[in-house]
Image: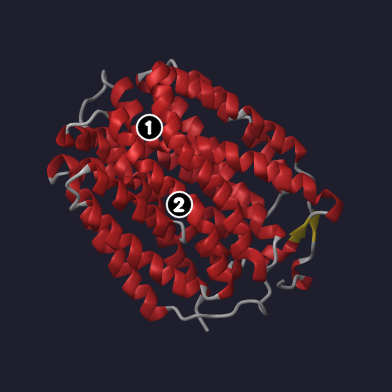
């Protein structure tokens, strides 16, 4: 039998790697553009196939996780994403770059439907573990901007992909040696401690559908655009890529703190009670950020990441609470297919909106989109609590 803490520890590391790997390009593009002789708006669309694969691939990987083995899929995740990152470090043409980024997206698509389902299966307190898992993913986002900026400045952008690729493969080897395949369908799980009435499930599905599209699109757009936004708007403070990475990392730390706090609250309160006030953050801060610069922009960015990252934790907990063990990877695969497909489209949308009116137009557009998040929180029904002692898996 696997140790739950060991499994969750590796899966949390996988969440860090998943988001880190997907956002190296967003930070490195500032240095890669001049090296490859391409403008920002020309180079950014090469990331689109990888982000689309990030979502589309989750349908297959979630099915394999349920029908084959979540453990085996995670081994493939660590090995595949590590090799793909290393491959980016050796590309010579834009076409090769697009292919390597596509490979990263395909292997990265394994994590969320499979890894998140493993967290739910082994969690004692669902909200706490989902919050901590979210922190690890957030730290991956933050570290990607920070470490890529530092490595890109001192070693070159190629090493910014090769070094984390090697580390990921080593973690995968350790995971394969210490974690075995295990059927968890007979274990009591924290996820079974809350339900909604069957008559209200359509409201859950509708709310989840709306908020997943809006949050995933906004989340990805912000994380992709933030390094470039800071490079433009914080020019009076610094022009150093490394220092810009540090500032972006500090902003994401607030998102990590929010996810941990939201996770703790999920164990005590209903998802509706948490989601509604959280939904009010995004639209105002996105709208304000459109015209801000320097310190006021940093403060607005903190509000944006708190709202976006907090909602991600609520969405993941929603799927975990309301699905049974044998269907959980597939339920997450649908959730992430919708979310990451929308997120993949956001990369091209960011490039197009940036060409039309810069970051003012882009941020105003996403502020309008996030008004739907408020509507989704209102639609969400109240939970029916099930006593923990009588909760059963499946």
Residue 378 horizontal/vertical position (percent)? 75, 35
> Residue 347's quadrant in the figure?
top left
Marker count (numbered): 2
Q: Which residue lies furthest to the left in this view?
A: 155
Would you name the residue on which mark 1 appears?
Answer: 226
Residue 127 horizontal/vertical position (percent)? 61, 56
> Residue 191's quadrant in the figure?
bottom right
How far apart marks 2 and 1 lie (CA) works out to 20 Å
**Residue drawn at x 79%, y 48% as measured from the top left:** 202
Image height of 70 relative to 88, above or below:
below
- Secondary structure beneath disc 1? helix
> Residue 325's quadrant in the figure?
bottom right
Residue 117 horizontal/vertical position (percent)? 57, 64
Q: In this view, does 12 lie to the left or right of 192?
A: left
C-beta proximity under 8 Å, tags 2 and 1:
no
Residue 54: image tag: 2
Please say which color scheme the image uses. secondary structure
């Amino acid at each position: 039998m696997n140790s739950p803490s060991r499994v969750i520890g590796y899966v949390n590391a996988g969440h860090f790697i998943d988001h880190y790997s997907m956002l190296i390009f967003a930070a490195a593009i500032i240095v890669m553009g001049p090296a490859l002789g391409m403008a920002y708006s020309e180079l950014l669309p090469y990331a689109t196939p990888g982000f689309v694969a990030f979502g589309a691939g989750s349908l297959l990987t979630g099915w394999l996780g349920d029908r084959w083995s979540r453990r085996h899929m995670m081994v493939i995740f660590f090995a595949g994403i590590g090799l793909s990152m290393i491959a980016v470090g050796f590309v010579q043409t834009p076409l090769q770059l697009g292919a390597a980024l596509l490979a990263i997206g395909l292997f990265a698509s394994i994590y969320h439907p499979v890894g998140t389902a493993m967290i739910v299966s082994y969690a004692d307190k669902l909200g706490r573990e989902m919050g901590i898992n979210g922190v690890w993913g957030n730290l991956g986002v933050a570290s990607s901007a920070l470490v890529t900026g530092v490595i890109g400045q001192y070693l070159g952008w190629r090493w910014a992909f090769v070094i984390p690729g090697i580390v990921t493969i080593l973690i995968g080897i350790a995971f394969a040696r210490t974690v075995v395949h295990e059927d968890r369908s007979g274990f009591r799980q924290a996820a079974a401690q809350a339900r909604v009435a069957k008559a209200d499930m359509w409201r859950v599905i509708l709310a989840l559908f709306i908020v997943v599209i809006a949050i995933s699109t906004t989340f990805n757009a912000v994380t992709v655009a933030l390094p470039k936004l800071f490079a433009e708007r914080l020019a009076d403070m610094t022009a150093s890529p490394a220092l810009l990475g540090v500032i972006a990392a500090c902003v994401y730390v607030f998102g990590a703190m929010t996810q941990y706090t939201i996770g703790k609250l999920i164990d005590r309160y209903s998802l509706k009670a948490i989601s509604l006030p959280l939904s009010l953050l995004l639209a105002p801060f996105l709208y304000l950020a459109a015209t801000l610069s320097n310190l006021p922009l940093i403060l607005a960015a903190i509000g944006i990441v708190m709202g976006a990252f907090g909602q991600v934790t609520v969405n993941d907990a929603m799927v975990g609470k309301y699905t049974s063990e044998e269907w959980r990877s597939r339920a997450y695969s649908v959730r992430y297919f919708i979310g990451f497909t929308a997120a993949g489209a956001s990369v091209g949308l960011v490039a197009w909106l940036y060409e039309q009116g810069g970051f003012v137009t882009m941020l105003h557009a996403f502020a309008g989109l996030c008004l739907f998040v408020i509507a989704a929180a209102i639609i969400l029904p109240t939970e029916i609590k099930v006593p923990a002692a009588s909760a059963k898996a499946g």
